[in-house]
Amino acid sequence: MKNYYDILGVSKKASEEDIKKAFRTLAHKYHPDKKSGDEAKFKEVSEAYSVLSDKKKRAEYDAYGKTFAGGGGPQGGGFGGFDFSGFQNGGGFDFNGQNVEFDLGDIFGEFFGGGGASRAQSRGRDVSIDIELSFKESIFGTDRRVLVSKIGVCETCEGSGAKKGSKMVTCTSCNGKGEIRETRNSIFGTVTTTRTCPKCHGRGEIPETVCPTCRGEGVARRQEEIHVSVPAGVSDGEMIRMPGRGEVAPGGGAGDLYVKLHVKQDSAFTREGTTLITTLSIKLTDALLGGTYTVRTLDGDESVPVPAGVVHGEMIRLKSKGVPSGRGSRGDLLVRIDIQFPKKLSKAARDLVEKLRSEGL
């Protein structure tokens, strides 16, 4: 059995958010569309996430996965605490004196090639793209339109898979049921599994004449313009998930689109949470006597009074000039004072400084 926690690199006590974060990182790393991608790893990561992100599936995996991984057969009263005698008669099993019923396909689907997961609607691949933002766009948010090449609903037949004017007929492989039942003998007895019909993709019908564009699949690779709304206050490396905007599976649903944000650095500003920090260089005389300077903010230039006696490294706070918090308020802009000391002094300037020294300054 695969250890899904190890695949995602999280502990068994990981929260839903930890699992989601780990999946996003690995999905971006291994996505087949990237030059450094790994399709096998991507499928493995997606499989692990599909189980651990579902509360019911995760509970079943935590409870039964390790037991079934041991192999072998029943010993004494059961197999690792399980009594499988009820399987032969289509019943449940005994676990520590408690009878439990469930669909064998859900547990053993990966061994027999079918089961509950196969009967569920298939889902297309997730798609990952990158967007570069300016520093200001990351602070205030922006809208982008990007062209994505992916497998989507065929525009010629609108997803039916049929040529224009052609009708749909009953699938001969599944007799219109959309599912194929298979019975196999196993170490647990006779096991019946159900899987989606590969010919009609679970629809129960197929086109009499297939669409020339998608060849009856109902999906085709095409370019789609997608509108991405970037919220205010995003950070570098943050991901935006757009459900249902990924690739579409034949006869099934669509995967998700993951947008990774890359924020350009700004030479004038640094960010700490919702607070922005910038530096203001002032002359020594203004540090002693005070003055007024123009400071660049993300909202435009701002006139800032510098008090007399300000010290090097002191901060002047400009309220509500920082990063939007998402609650209708904004952080502050901190202006760090950088006193510029002259490297050379004229004779007159030196005489004046000497007088200040004689005054005890």
Image (cartoon, rainbow, N blue to C red):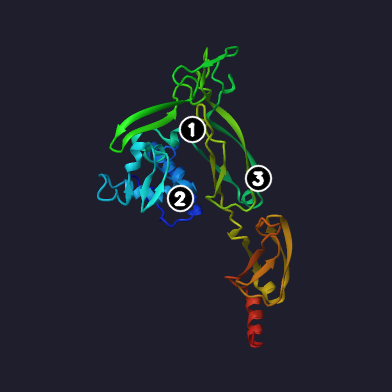
Left or right relative to 350: residue 41: left
Nearest to the eye among marks 2 and 3: give it: 2
Residue 142: numbered disc? 3
Nearest to the eye among marks 3 and 1: give it: 1
Question: Earlier along the polypeptide chain: callout 3 or callout 1?
Answer: 1
SS for callout 1: loop
* Residues marked 2 and 3 touching at CB (< 8 Å): no
x%, y% of residue 253?
Answer: 54, 32
| Numbered label tally | 3
Report which quarter residue 102 is drawn in: top left
Residue 22: numbered disc? 2
* Residues marked 2 and 1 touching at CB (< 8 Å): no
Q: Amino acid at mark 3?
A: Thr
Q: Nearer the viewer, residue 63 or 35?
A: 63
Question: Earlier along the polypeptide chain: callout 2 or callout 1?
Answer: 2
- Residue neighbourhood size for the residue with mark 1, other residues' Cα within 10 Å, grouped as few (<14), some (14–19), many (≥20): some
Vertical arrangement, residue 308 with respect to residue 278, above or below: below
Q: Nearer the viewer, residue 159 or 320?
A: 159
Report which quarter residue 114 is drawn in: top left
Q: Which residue is mark 1?
A: 122
x%, y% of residue 105?
Answer: 40, 37
x%, y% of residue 98?
Answer: 40, 51
Q: Nearer the viewer, residue 335 or 41?
A: 41
Q: Amino acid at mark 1?
A: Ser
